[in-house]
Amino acid sequence: MLTIGPYRLKNPFILAPMAGVSEQPFRVLAFRLGAALCPTELVSAQGLFRVNERSLRYLRHDPQVEIPYSLQLFGGEPEVMAQAAVIGKQWGAQLIDVNMGCPVKKVTKSGAGSALLCDAPRAGEVVRQIRAATGLPVTAKIRSGWDAHQKNFLAMADELGAAGVAALAVHPRTRAQGYSGKADWTVIADLKRHVGDKFPIIGNGDVKTVADATRMREQTGCDFVMIGRGALGNPWLFRELLGGPKPTPQERCETVLDHFRAHLAFVSDGRVERDKTRTPEEVAAFSRLAAVKQFRKHMGWYAHGLFGASAFRNTINTLEDVAELERRVEQFFLGAKEDAQGADEEQDLDYRTALG
């Protein structure tokens, strides 16, 4: 079952929506390397409802590449979520994905994210009202439950199924676990058996290699595999999942630079016109510096598993000049060799910043 609503996806591999990562440049890169679907990072329904400029900027996408374009919203009020989804549709959204799994307190305290796990009827009403307001397929992403004593993923599936959800992704950790411990894939298997063929189940959690993805599909029977941390610094994983090769040092270097330059353009887009408090030159300099600082985490992820990664991260975390940063990227990635021991270690990378 490779369909979600009216859309038949080209394969079963989906990029997870990740805060501060799933912006247009990274989604486009993942699509081009083989991902079948790349939802946006979580976007505030309240922000869209209030026509907040920052929230609206999250809606930017490439309609030539991002097909279908899936917009992930978070919020706790069904009416506001529905109106935000209408705005998303006006911007080109073809799928609306509802975040019901984010464990971050600033999200849950407003009744959004994982808080919806504690109120299945309200979660169902969110799906109903979005469908009624937009006519678009609505998907959702949940966790196994709030905590070890409240694992209600089957009840959530029943409620969301009755509301007409087009597909359901499950991250098999509780809200209390956050991103610690090991993902319990038996949750995915139980959910798939429970749902059957009523709607597709998307498995998520601890998929970092081709072998992991294969095992998840075999052990759980899930229809799709959603990959988050495994794609950070390794978007080529989607190509490998389809039988393609790992990147050469030359390709790795070119991709890092292309991604960085696309990120520079993404961050700079429209700022000169919007910012009337600075000169165009000041705005451009400010945008470049912001883009460089934001992209440092990506540089760290790209370097992970290569000899000299730690020293490279220490260097780039002090650089602010675009030309010097690009020179250092070429110097490192063109000559970098894989470090099997380093790849097995998390080193000092904080992946949690991408998993809001």
Image: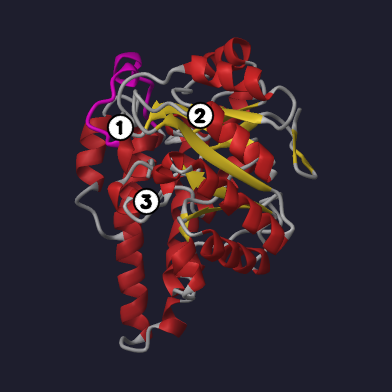
The correct choice, above or below, for 193 with respect to 308 in the image is: above
Amino acid carrying label 1: it is Ala
Q: Residue furthest front?
A: 121
Q: Nearer the viewer, residue 206 or 5?
A: 5
Mark-to-mark CA distance, 3 and 1: 41 Å
Seen at 65% across and 52% down, the residue is: 128
The answer to whether residue 169 is above or below residue 6 is above
Mark 2–mark 3 Cα distance, whole angstroms, equals 46 Å
Magenta residues: mostly which secondary structure?
A: loop
Residue density around tag 1, few if under 14, some if 14–19, many if 20 or more, within 10 Å = few
- Circle 3 Cα neighbour tier, 10 Å, few/some/many (<14 / 14–19 / ≥20): some
Identify the residue position indicated by label 2 in the image.
153
| Cα–Cα span, label 1 and label 2 | 14 Å
Magenta extent:
335-350
Image location of residue 100, percent across then percent down: 47, 43
Residue type (three-letter) at the residue carrying disc 3: Glu
Foreground: disc 3 or disc 1: 1
Q: Is residue 148 magenta?
A: no
Task: Confirm whether the magenta stretch covers residue 339.
Answer: yes
Quarter occupied by the N terminus = top right
Identify the disc placed on residue 326: 3
Labelled disc at residue 80: none
Q: Nearer the viewer, residue 22 or 253?
A: 22
Q: Earlier in the sequence, mark 2 or mark 3?
A: 2
Question: Is residue 317 shown left or right of residue 139?
Answer: left
Q: Which residue is mark 1?
A: 176
Q: What residue type is disc 2 on?
A: Phe
Which of the two labelled residues, at mark 1 and mark 2, occupies the earlier sequence position?
Answer: 2
Q: Closer to the camera: disc 2 or disc 3?
A: 2
Q: Earlier in the sequence, mark 3 or mark 1?
A: 1
